[in-house]
Amino acid sequence: MEFLLDYGLFLAKALTALLVALILITAIVGALRNARQQEQLPSRLEVRHLNDEYERAGLTLKSAMLPTKAVKSERKALKARRKQHGQSSRPRLFVLDFHGDIRASATESLREEITAILTAASADDEVLVRLESGGGMIPPYGLAAAQLLRLRDRGIRLTVAVDRVAASGGYMMACVADRILTAPFAILGSIGVIAQVPNFNRMLKKHEIDFEQFMAGEHKRTVTLFGENTDQGRHKFQQEIEQAHELFKDFVARYRPQVDLAEIATGEYWYGTQALEHKLADQVLTSDEYLLERSQNAELYAVSKRVRKPLLSRILPGAGEAWSRLRGLI
């Protein structure tokens, strides 16, 4: 009898554990499916009126410092200003943020944001891009710079603010602006091209592993990861790097003719105050200070494309790669 009781207790525990496991698995699978469905939903454009945000922040601070009567007067004055601004034809300043990685992945969002602005902006308006990028691959950053040029081509004033860094491809984007603002210790420049290629040929030979490569076209492959590189291949690869550098310099010279290319196109970078001396920037001023100044005589709108991320990426930072692997299993 005691044996049956023990066995029944064990069985109940096992069934309970199995039930809990099934519930957890069902919840995880459901969450992954919901994440896939949410990922397929279209992203949307978000617009924030920065003037209202500044005024609300100021009123909150005044509420803690001023008497109740004075706060009420401030609220009335704020409502009156908002009504007046709504009826006025003050110029508009559209604010965009670009955070660049090596592939300039934010270009797609930048493209849609600029397209939206071009449907509403006039020649009296201005676009401020808060740019942050240490550079990356040439074609993606060339495309990002071309997106900014769409604004200039339509006669809309473009200002780029660099609070931290705009180097290499980042500066390629910045240089197309009508005006470049820089924080005192922001990094600008790095007008150069670099490529690094590891070679495992000696290791393969050591382990008696053959590597064969077939090409059609003399310069289809200049240097290689696994084959034995030749002086001819290295020379051709260096030529390609030099050609890319010349194109980069020509691009900067076209939109920043005031710079001395021989001085600044060496691959070096400079901090904000130094960049101003080298004419890589036009004014030492943070984006925050510039926006606060412009809020006095313009309507400020922050425009951003909200990109829907998978559920796991929102819950667990860094889970994007894991989600990419799991999505194919559902």
Image: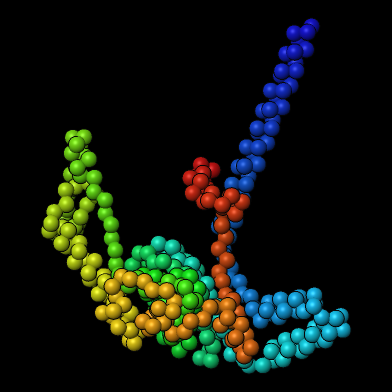
Position of 320 with respect to 177 (left or right) is right
> In this rendering, is residue 191 above or below 220?
below
Q: Please state the total of marks drawn on the protein image.
A: 0
Residue 8 x/y as whole percent: 75, 16
Residue 30 in percent (x, y) is at: 63, 44
Quarter location, residue 39: bottom right
Direction from residue 93 to residue 66 in the image, left or right:
right
- Residue in view at x 49 percent, y 67 percent: 99
Image location (x, y in percent) of residue 172: 37, 74
Residue in view at x 42 percent, y 74 percent:
271
Q: Residue furthest top?
A: 1
| Quadrant of the image occupied by residue 80 | bottom right
Residue drawn at x 70%, y 24% as measured from the top left: 15
Q: Nearer the viewer, residue 10 or 188?
A: 188
Q: Is residue 200 above or below residue 137?
A: above
Query: Which percent across, then down, holds residue 90?
Result: 62, 91
Is 325 situated left or right of 312 in this image? left
| Residue lying at the far right of the rendered structure | 69
Whether residue 114 appears in this view of the structure is no
Who's the residue at 20% across and 44% down the image? 201
Q: Which quadrant holds the N terminus?
A: top right
